Image (tube, rainbow, N blue to C red):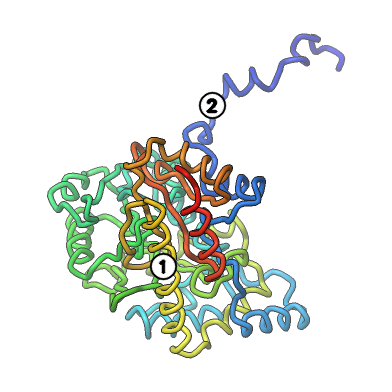
Amino acid sequence: MPGIPQSSRKETPTRFFSTHPSRADHFTESVIREMTRLSIKHHAINLAQGFPDFPCPVELKTAACSAINDDYNQYAITWGEQNLREALATRVKDYNGMTFDPETEITVTCGSTEAMMTSMLALIQPGDEVIVPEPFYENYGPDAQISGAVPQYVQFKDDLSIDEEVWKSAFTKKTRAIILNSPNNPTGKVLSREELSFIADLCIDHDVIAITDEIYEHILYDGRKHVSIGSLDGMRDRTITIGSFSKTYSVTGWRVGYALAGREITERLRKIHDFLTVGAPAPLQHACIAALWLPESYYHDLAQEYDRKRRILFDGLRNAGFTCRLPEGAYYIFADISDFSMTDTELAHHLVEKGGVAAVPGSSFYHEGGETKLRFTFSKKDETLTEACRRLEALDI
């Protein structure tokens, strides 16, 4: 170009990036999705990423096809199809014990992932602190950093109970929010009503918002009950409850989730959501209404099926030499690999390359540490799990 020195025009992108830092410089790509790519490369059984290899309910497939054939192919209203929001309000009242106005307090999002990011951006000012209990789902740390927050990590005890003094000390004048996930990914821990009440008191005392990811709320074992912290006294208007159709109805690729919150918080959420994604897929929103019409027996059967699957994987992992405990909820086993001579990353790569089974290195779920853990999902057909267990037991580790 005339007037521009040749040397300036040849400046390399490498030089640009070295002098222009980015938020993306502070975290890595998803380790979970990386392990899926390695699983495909090595033709392995993917027990890394938490998606089913079996069909979703036929009612959802029929409803999705009908919605497309009926030309629900254009934008829905930004915060969600009205009939879906109304159906969600009814379901949430019946199951979670919380009442929300579908017109002003429910926002349909592109999966729970967008709901979490939207919540962070709607609440956080740069420099605010956000408490992240660990081990945590790997998105939460980057979510905090992208929003400008300073994550403050607080650990569960080895038995996954709460050390109350440690948790109390994590709350400061700078704390804006705490991220909760129950049932938990990766550990399967289900927070009890007593534990949630303790956390609620801290939130109220310190004027903190609870952002709670409850996407595994129907996948519970051994008689455990799901409690939403937003249903506890004093928490209704200081909680964002995040849910999704992905796990409960086996449609992780549909990307339809939602955020439930009081009117004032929802006004902020909807502004961020609008400019992030505009809206979730319109025909799939219509199909998700059919999911909310399924009978109560569906949820009972879902938990029973996953209970059977967790025991298949649990027995197989134990027989292969892993140390692990049965999860209380969700569909993962967080296995201990201390008895092996490899780190989590080394063992995960060895398993996928030599054993034909993909798992997730435990360090993906900690800001520091986790090298003695691997996460396996059992959201697969029984025959898939049986074959994965056979491969693990046959592998010389």
Identify which residue is drawn at 41% across, 36% down: 342
On screen, residue 56 versus residue 183, left or right, reads right
Q: Nearer the viewer, residue 64 or 283?
A: 64
Q: Nearer the viewer, residue 386 or 246?
A: 386
In the rendered image, the quadrant that contains the N terminus is top right
Q: Is residue 272 visible?
A: no
- Give residue 330's quadrant in the image: bottom left
Q: Closer to the N terminus: mark 1 or mark 2?
A: 2
Q: With respect to residue 322, does 23 lie above or below?
A: above
On screen, residue 58 versus residue 330, left or right, reads right
* Image location (x, y in percent) of residue 225: 29, 76
Which residue is under mark 2? Answer: 21
Q: Nearer the viewer, residue 348 or 178?
A: 348
Q: With respect to residue 67, does 349 lie above or below?
A: above
Count of all numbered marks drawn on residues in the image: 2
On screen, residue 110 versus residue 225, left or right, reads right
* Image location (x, y in percent) of residue 348: 49, 43
Q: With respect to residue 284, does 155 lie above or below?
A: above
* Image location (x, y in percent) of residue 339: 32, 42
Which residue is under mark 1? Answer: 310
Identify which residue is drawn at 62% across, 71% down: 77
Q: Is residue 339 visible?
A: yes
